Amino acid sequence: MQAAIVPVTPFQQNCTLMWCEETMQGAVVDPGGEIDRLISIVEEQGIKLVKILVTHGHIDHAGGVADLADRLEIPIEGPHKDDQFWIDGLAEQGDRFGTGEPARSFTPDRWLEGGDTVSFGNVTLQVRHCPGHTPGHVIFFHEELRVAQVGDVLFQGSIGRTDFPKGDHATLLASIKNELWPLGDDVTFIPGHGPTSTFGQERRTNPFVADG
């Protein structure tokens, strides 16, 4: 599997392209906006996008999902159904927070649960349900490559906000410790914003979740 991080919108959200090197089939995680640019990159790389993966329903992650799904006629998988209220309110989020682009709600072709898998080409990703930032947040993990796309659960040196509706700080900490840490200290993670890191680095240095 190959992956490319493409920061999009004024929020500089890490949209992630992932693709199978054998088949060149791929998926895009959290296309929050700048859909024309994303499609151009996909075409330049020779990738055939076959699905959209969504970690959670905030506009900077999901604002461009409906547009991209319609234009490429590809299915949407994720997040967990507990984020439906966020997805239903995407237009309102656009009015409040403003990404510079209109946002439409959508109904995923498949809601995801912890323990599910998603696949494209010969690539399979594990799904973990990690509520706290939002109640329906999920993350995607490639076991062989030791790489995870964690959305807004964890960042280098920080964690996701929990002051949004149905966010919960204790729940987020439990998700990190119970769903992320067991995957292994060697796992490199792509956060929703900012640089990559490893779970081991965050367990040593992140003031919010460091061991001890």
Image: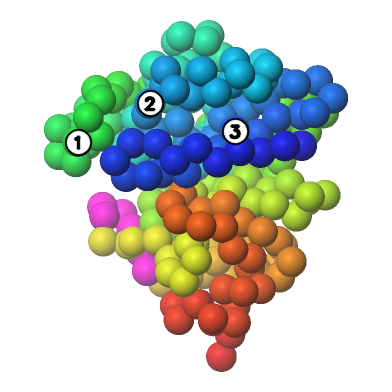
Q: Position of residue 7 (x, y in %)?
A: 44, 40
Residue 78 in the figure: left or right of residue 21: left
Residue 163 seen in the figure? yes
Measured along the vertical axis of the image, is residue 132 above or below residue 121? Answer: below
Q: Which comes before the other along the chain, label 1 or label 3?
A: 3
Residue 10 in the figure: left or right of residue 198: left
User: Is 199 one of the magenta-colored residues?
Assistant: no
Q: Which comes before the other along the chain, label 1 or label 2?
A: 2
Circle 1 sits in a helix, a strand or a loop, which is it?
Answer: loop
Q: Give the quadrant of residue 35.
A: top left
Marks 1 and 2, how far apart in space?
13 Å
Circle 3 sits in a helix, a strand or a loop, which is it?
Answer: strand
Q: Give the quadrant of residue 94.
A: top left
Q: Residue furthest left?
A: 96
Looking at the rendering, the stretch of residues picked out in magenta corresponds to 164-169
From the image, tell me which residue sits under label 2.
Answer: 34
- Please report the residue visible at 59 percent of the width from the left and 33 percent of the height from the top: 17
Circle 2 sits in a helix, a strand or a loop, which is it?
Answer: loop
From the image, tell me which residue sits under label 1.
Answer: 98
From the image, tell me which residue sits under label 3.
Answer: 17
Q: Which comes before the other along the chain, label 2 or label 3?
A: 3
